[in-house]
Amino acid sequence: MYSTSHTEDFVKELYTSVGILDPLQLNIKIISSKLEIRVFYWHEPSQAIFLNNYPYIVLNSQQSDQAMWQDFCHELCHVLFHSGNQRRIRESFRQYQEAKANQFMYHACIPSFMLDELNIFDTTYESIRKVCKLFNVEYEFASKRLTKYIFNKLLC
């Protein structure tokens, strides 16, 4: 039987605890509202910041909706798990945080517990396009996520 990772379990628990059970609920407005995170848009790279212990995610508005959603989930990881100013930490630790945020982003954008409901077992063009459309992500992003998801399922 397939054993889920800590990240998969965390995302499922987080989303279900705030009533997010369907891919149509996976969007910046709903999640930021339920988690009480303020979101702003600008023309610089996306980032997460804390002001007076309150979390903010600032997204680059010059991207596609799909890229902003992916950035939001990356920055969400920083809000949930990281603290401090990345400019003041060791480069190796900053790289570690970025790698963790990138891993988290794939699971937050396309949660395994929602993929499980789709019964997709291949990475054909049609399957990847279905995931793109349903989860509002870019094609390459969906392809990478679906490939990892199926590979992990096959290992068990």
Image: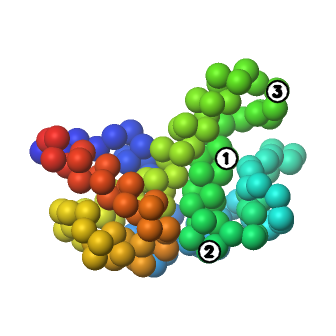
Q: Identify the residue under disc 1.
A: 79
Position of residue 86 relative to residue 11, above or below, is above
From the image, state whether disc 2 or disc 1 is nearer to you.
2
Q: CA distance from mark 2 to mark 1?
A: 20 Å
Is the Cβ of the residue at disc 2 closer than 8 Å to that at disc 1?
Answer: no
The amino acid on which the numbered mark 1 sits, given as a three-letter code, is Val
Q: Residue at x 74, y 62 (%)?
A: 59
Is the Cβ of the residue at disc 3 closer than 8 Å to that at disc 1?
Answer: no
Dot 3 falls on a residue whose secondary structure is helix
Disc 2 or 1, which lies upstream in sequence?
A: 2
The amino acid on which the numbered mark 2 sits, given as a three-letter code, is Asp
Label 2: how many Cα within 10 Å (few below 14, some 14–19, many 20+): some
> Could you say where residue 156 lies in the image, as x and y percent from the top left?
14, 41
Q: Identify the residue under disc 2.
A: 65
Q: Identify the residue under disc 3.
A: 88
Left or right? Give the position of 113 relative to 61.
left
Q: Nearer the viewer, residue 41 or 1?
A: 41
Res. 56 in view? no
